[in-house]
Each structure stands twice: as C-alpha cells, then as structure tokens.
Amino acid sequence: MITASQHNIDRRFELVASIARNAMVIIVLFAVSFDTMAYEQAFAKTAVNKIEVRLLPPARLLATGLPGAYFDKSGKLFSRLFDYIRNNEVAMTVPVEGDLNRAEMRFYVGTDSPPTLEESETVKLVDVPARRVASIGGRGSYSESNIDKARVRLEAWMATQTEWTAAGAPYAVFWNGPFTPWFMKRFEVHLPIKSANAD
C-alpha cells in the first residue's frame, strides 16, 4: 500500500526529473542558437567518422603560441585570439585550428574583416596558400584523448594509401565554441598531404 508520504516523494521526484529534462532542452537550444550564429565558415565540415581528401582554399590566419603543450594552454591561446578579434573588429570565422605538436592556435580571418590588420606582440598574421589535406571528422569533447584517437585512425588510413604521402604534421580543427554541449561538438584532424608522385 502506497502511503501519502511515498506518493509525495514520487511526485517530487517526477517534478525534479521534469525540470531537469526541460533545463537540458533549454541548454541545448541555447547552445545551438549561440553556436550557429552567422559565423562565416572557411570551408565545409568533414562528416563524422568519414575520412576524405580535401583541397582547402587560401586563407589568412591569426596565430598565437605559448611554451608548453597545446591542451594545457588552449584556454589562454583562445583568449588571446578572441581579445584580438574583438579589439580589431575582426569577424569570427570557423573553424579554429590547433597545432598538436606545440601550443599554437589559429583563427581564420573572415571576409567581412577590416582590409588592413596589424600584428601585435602575441598575435601574428599568416597567409597560407591552398592546402590539400586528408581529413577525418569527429564528434565529442575537445579532449586530448579524442583528438589523439582520430589522429591515430587518420595516420593508419594514410599508411594504406599509395596515391598520397604526408607533407606536414597533423593538426586539429575545432568547429564549436565553449557553450556547446560536449556531445554536440564537432572536430576534425587534418594531415597535409601531397601526391606520392610529386617531385
């Protein structure tokens, strides 16, 4: 027999569960709307778990670096670059690149940005030509282990290729901001490549 006390406890539990579900929906909707504001994309995303060869367009990047490992310094690197684009009225453009071999982060400069920009003591301008890369898409938190798993899988795929050979070090590509729930975040690992028959 269910007592009045037990009934009240059950109702309270259901109420708390309902509030939690509604709060999660609100958080997700806020994150999606915040994260999908009219940010310019430098190029299209690679689908999750897909590996493909892509030609990235020429671009201007903002780069900053620090001593140490990337995943230990990513927060400070992001703050530096975000402060720069805010102070110089540079349009936020996605994705963001992260060097996996050192603590360096790069923002793309959008087409709506000021035509002339000056370097600062900590932020440098880098013009890069079109790049051909092997790309693997992923979903999940921007943890070192997730990125490393994708990198290992991409390098294993590259080892089976006869048409392409590596032309540089792998780097990470991050599509979403800090307000996006971890299970909605998209990322990629890129490996610069060139034709195996190139001189």
Image (spheres, rainbow, N blue to C red):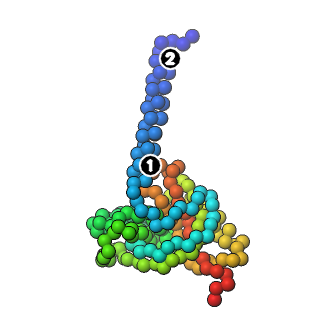
Question: For the point 50% across and 21% down, which residue is it?
Answer: 10
Quarter occupied by the C terminus: bottom right
At a point 46% along the width and 18% down the height, the residue shown is 8
Q: Which of 102 and 112 is in front in this view?
A: 112
**Residue situated furthest bottom in the rendering:** 199
User: How far across and how far down the image is residue 94, in percent?
Assistant: 44, 63
Label 2 secondary element: helix
Residue 46 higher or lower than 14, as above or below = below
C-alpha gap between disc 2 and disc 1? 39 Å
Instruction: Point out which mark residue 6 bears.
Output: 2
Position of residue 136 measured from the top left corner of the image (x, y, whole percent): 60, 64
Q: Are marks 2 and 1 in contact (CB under 8 Å)?
A: no
- First in sequence: mark 2 vs mark 1: 2
Which image quarter: residue 89? bottom left
User: Could you classify mark 1 by the number of other residues whose Cα lies within 10 Å: few (under 14), some (14-19), or many (20 or more)?
Assistant: some
Disc 2 residue type (three-letter): Gln
Q: As shown in the figure, which amino acid type bears the numbered disc 1? A: Val
The label on residue 122 is: none
Q: Nearer the viewer, residue 114 or 11?
A: 114
What mark, if any, has residue 32 been given in the picture?
A: 1
Give the residue drawn at x 57%, y 75%: 132
The picture quadrant where one finds residue 145 is bottom right
Q: Which residue is drawn at 38% across and 77% down?
A: 125
Residues 55 and 169: in front is: 55
Residue placed furthest toward the front: 112
Q: Quadrant of residue 27?
A: top left
Can see residue 124? yes
Q: Position of residue 90 (x, y in %)?
A: 33, 67
What secondary structure is marked by label 1? helix
Q: In which quarter of the image is the N terminus?
A: top right
